[in-house]
Amino acid sequence: MKELLDLAQLLEQGQSQKVLTLTQQLVDSGLSPQTILNEGLIAGMAVVGEKMRNGEMYLPEVLQSAGAMKASLAILKPHLAREGTASRGKILIGTVKGDMHDIGKNLVTIMLQGAGFEVIDIGLNVEPQRFVTAITEHTPAVLGLSAMLTTTMLNMKTTIEAIASAGLRSQVKIIIGGAPVSQKFADEIGADGYSRDAVLAVNKVRQLMGHTSY
Ligand code: B12
């Protein structure tokens, strides 16, 4: 669909206002928010990632694209999230220490909220000790850790170790995600699960909580 290609391209160019307008138009036209997300925004961001790696795009431009994606996600959020459902359980989520990427985490948050979970998002660049404190304070059933860099993914391990040292490991299931991580890495660092994207994250969380019937 031409409009979705346009949306991806506008996102790549960091044209926030045009991205916003087109997102709203596509929503109004009745196109599914999931399609707008996958074939417009995520597709556009994948190109940004490629260009970044090849040195064709630099940080200020990537930030523009990230800003456009965040703004567009704010329009999609109420359409992705189902309102008014009773909480199916509490999830704590954050991006680990040293890592400033939060778009993927935010998307996982939106999808979990849409599935009826209460999500406490403690942001990005989160120190292990802050996760420990937040687990004590909120007693979540599941903790989600996000990392987008091969360097910061190691802080997932440090975080899990800090949780274990505080004697809290058996109280919370831990799920990890982000571009550089994998099921293999999850196994290596003793996480309970891994998901490659936000939709699968919802399934995984349900599974970890023992919700199998819906
Ligand atoms: C946008 C972006 C930025 C923005 C982030 C803005 C923001 N607020 O998030 C800015 C400009 C700040 C940035 C900075 C940097 N970035 Co950057 N960035 C990206 C980019 C282009 C897109 C990431 C994104 O938002 N994708 C869209 C979302 C929807 O996808 P996602 O994040 O993958 O999330 C999905 C899944 O991974 C999963 N998921 C994510 N989190 C979680 C958590 C859980 C619990 C679960 C279950 C699932 C899950 O579900 C999500 C939704 O489906 C990627 C390229 C890429 N292909 O990923 C590079 C990329 C991640 N960045 C990279 C680099 C190198 C950097 C910098 C070091 C650059 C520099 N020289 O300074 C800095 C590091 C800053 C820091 N300390 O963190 C590299 C990482 C290389 C590596 N292997 O380590 C990448 C891969 C680009 C590249 N190809 O080289 N970046």
Image (cartoon, grey):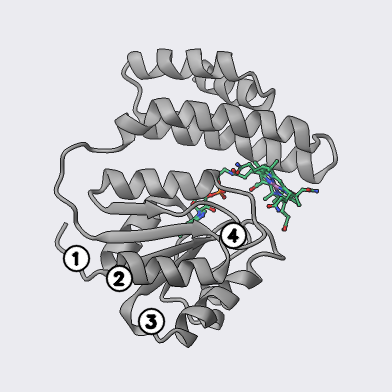
| Eye-nearest disc, 3 or 4 | 3
Labelled disc at residue 168:
3
Residue 90 vs residue 33: left or right?
Answer: left
In what element is the residue under mark 3? loop
Residue with the mark numbered 4:
147
Q: Earlier in the sequence, mark 3 or mark 1?
A: 3
Q: Earlier in the sequence, mark 3 or mark 2?
A: 3
Question: Which residue is located at x 62 percent, y 34 percent?
Answer: 66
Query: Within 10 Å of the Cα at label 3, are there few (<14), some (14-19), or many (20+) other Cα atoms?
Result: some
| Eye-nearest disc, 3 or 2 | 3
The residue closer to the viewer here, 60 or 52, is 60
Which percent across, then down, holds residue 173? 36, 74
Residue with the mark numbered 1:
212
In what element is the residue under mark 1? loop
In what element is the residue under mark 4? loop
| Residue contact between numbered discs 4 and 1, judged by CB atoms under 8 Å | no
Point out the residue furthest to the right here.
Answer: 55
Q: Earlier in the sequence, mark 2 or mark 4?
A: 4
Give the CA distance from mark 3 to mark 2. Answer: 17 Å
| Eye-nearest disc, 4 or 1 | 4
Which amino acid is tagged 4? Ala
Give the CA distance from mark 1 to mark 2. Answer: 9 Å
Residue with the mark numbered 2:
208
Q: Is residue 71 above or below residue 153?
A: above
Give the CA distance from mark 2 to mark 4. Answer: 20 Å
| Residue contact between numbered discs 2 and 4, judged by CB atoms under 8 Å | no
Give the CA distance from mark 4 to mark 1. Answer: 28 Å
Question: Which residue is located at x 30 percent, y 70 percent?
Answer: 208
Give the CA distance from mark 3 to mark 4. Answer: 21 Å
